[in-house]
Each structure stands twice: as C-alpha cells, then as structure tokens.
Image (tube, rainbow, N blue to C red):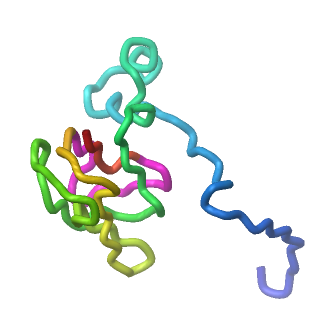
C-alpha cells in the first residue's frame, strides 16, 4: 500500500435497488446435511414469507424474544453489533415469531435471515 494509488469507481444505490443477497441454505449447517441435498429437499429459508434479513453485517449480541412469542411492529427482536455500534433490529409488522435461525454470538452477513414472523 504505502504510496500506491488504486482506481476506484463508486455507484450510488438506494435501498430499493439493492441486489438480493446470494441465497444459501442456512439450515444446512445446523442439521449437518450437505447444502446441495438440503437445497433439493427443503425450501431455502431466505424464500420464506416473513423472513427478516440482516440490514448490515455484524454479530448478534442478544436475542430479546423466543420462537412462539408475539411481537408488535417496532418491537426490538434482537441487537446486532456492527462496527462497534449496537443496532436494534425490530419487527417490521405484528405477528408471532416463527423461527430465529441465529444464536447469540453468531456472526451474520448482509442479507442473512435473522428471524421469521408469521
């Protein structure tokens, strides 16, 4: 690095233009089943209606509810740390928490499913 320069192009994007994250079966690793096999036999969790994805990469600091709990729109479901800042991830709508496929201490990437509301 030092005195080297690198050409860079930056394109401004708005949230509605954000590309969909690459889908990957999150459940596969937990079940110990090869991802290829899960992809053929189960729907990918990212395609499930009500899935709330990580708006930024980070570490799950705490989970404020459990599957089966009722939440209202705006309720904090979990706290995600990113770049040394705590971010409250809230329920986008009222409903029942169906699944939370992440655990406290887990590292998540942009677009990973954090929880599912039905």
* Figure quadrant of residue 85: bottom left
Q: Is 39 in front, or is 52?
A: 52
Which residue shows up at 38% across the image and 32% down it? 48
Q: In this view, does 4 lie above or below 63?
A: below
Residue drawn at (41%, 14%) of the image: 37
Percent coordinates x, y for residue 27 in the rendering: 32, 32
**As drawn, is 3 to the left or to the right of 20?**
right
- Corner quadrant of residue 7: bottom right
User: Which residue appears at 29% of the width and 58% of the height?
Assistant: 91
Q: Which part of the image, by quadrant, shows the N terminus?
A: bottom right
Residue 17 position, x and y percent, is 68, 54
Q: Is residue 110 above or below residue 75?
A: above
In the rendered image, the residue lying farthest to the bottom is: 3
Instruction: Please indicate whether residue 49 sits to the left or right of residue 20 in the image.
Output: left
What residue is at 34 percent from the left and 64 percent from the top?
A: 59
What kind of secondary structure does the magenta stretch mostly adopt? Answer: loop
Quadrant showing the C terminus: top left
Range of the magenta residues?
99-112
Residue 109 counted in the magenta span: yes
Q: Where is residue 45 in the image (x, y as percent from the top left)?
A: 38, 33
């Amino acid at each position: 690095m030092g005195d080297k320069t690198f050409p860079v192009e930056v394109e401004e994007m708005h949230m509605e233009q954000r590309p969909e994250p690459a889908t990957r079966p999150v459940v596969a690793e937990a079940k110990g089943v090869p991802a290829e096999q899960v992809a053929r036999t189960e729907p990918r969790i990212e395609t499930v209606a009500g899935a709330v994805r990580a708006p930024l990469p980070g570490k799950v600091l705490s989970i404020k509810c459990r599957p089966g709990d009722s939440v209202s729109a705006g309720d904090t479901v979990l706290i995600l740390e990113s770049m040394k800042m705590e971010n409250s991830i809230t329920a986008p709508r009222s409903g029942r928490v169906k699944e939370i496929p992440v655990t406290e201490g887990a590292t998540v990437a942009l677009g990973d499913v954090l929880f599912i509301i039905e």
